[in-house]
């Protein structure tokens, strides 16, 4: 998986993380290269974990309800209207 953030250092020696898709830059508030690398790894692993969790949720949903792939909003609305809602 492509890294979401990259590391760079500005003239003052402070390290920053830059979002590769948006270009947003965030200070890591450290001048230590090893600490900055660890913080960057945390940023990247958080992004990867989010994507993994989304795929796991989709897999669980498909397992729990196989018809979800073919269901439309119309079938959902018809099922809702068929209930006795008071």
Image (cartoon, helix red, strand yellow):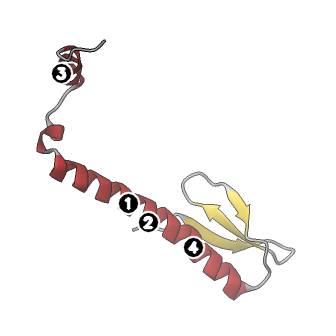
Judged from the image, the secondary structure of the residue bearing numbered disc 2 is helix
The reply, left or right, for residue 68 in relation to residue 9 is left
Pick the front one: 52 or 62: 62
Q: Is residue 86 above or below residue 66?
A: above
Q: Which residue is mark 2?
A: 49
Give the CA separation, mark 2 to mark 4.
10 Å
Label 3 or label 4, whichever lies nearer to me, is 3
Which callout, 1 or 4, points to the residue nearer the camera?
A: 1
Q: Residue at x 40, y 59 (%)?
A: 51
Name the residue furthest front. 86
Badge 1 element: helix
Residue 74 at what x, y percent from top left?
20, 19
Mark earlier in primary sequence (1, 4): 4
Q: Residues within 10 Å of mark 3 (few under 14, many from 20)?
A: few
Circles 3 and 2 in contact, beta carbons < 8 Å: no
Relative to 86, is 9 on the left or the right?
right
Quadrant location, the N terminus = bottom left
Q: Which mark is residue 42?
A: 4
Q: Earlier in the sequence, mark 3 or mark 4?
A: 4
Q: Residues within 10 Å of mark 2 (few under 14, many from 20)?
A: few
Structural distance between the alpha carbons of marks 3 and 4: 44 Å
Identify the residue at horizontal 69%, vertical 84% (top origin). Answer: 35
Res. 50 image quadrant: bottom left
The residue tagged 1 is 53
CA gap between label 3 and label 1 equals: 29 Å
Closer to the eye: label 3 or 1: 3
Front: mark 3 or 2: 3
Q: Which mark is residue 79?
A: 3
Instruction: Pick whichever of labels 3 and 2 is earlier in the sequence.
Output: 2
Q: Alpha-carbon distance for marks 2 and 1?
A: 6 Å
């Amino acid at each position: 998986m492509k890294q979401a953030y990259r590391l760079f250092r500005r003239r003052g020696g402070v390290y920053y993380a830059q979002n590769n898709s948006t270009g947003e830059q965030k200070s890591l508030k450290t001048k230590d290269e090893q600490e900055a690398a660890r913080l960057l790894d945390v940023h990247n692993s958080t992004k990867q974990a989010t994507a993994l969790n989304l795929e796991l949720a989709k897999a669980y949903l498909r397992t729990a309800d196989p018809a979800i792939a073919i269901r439309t909003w119309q079938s959902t609305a018809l099922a809702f209207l068929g209930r006795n809602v008071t």
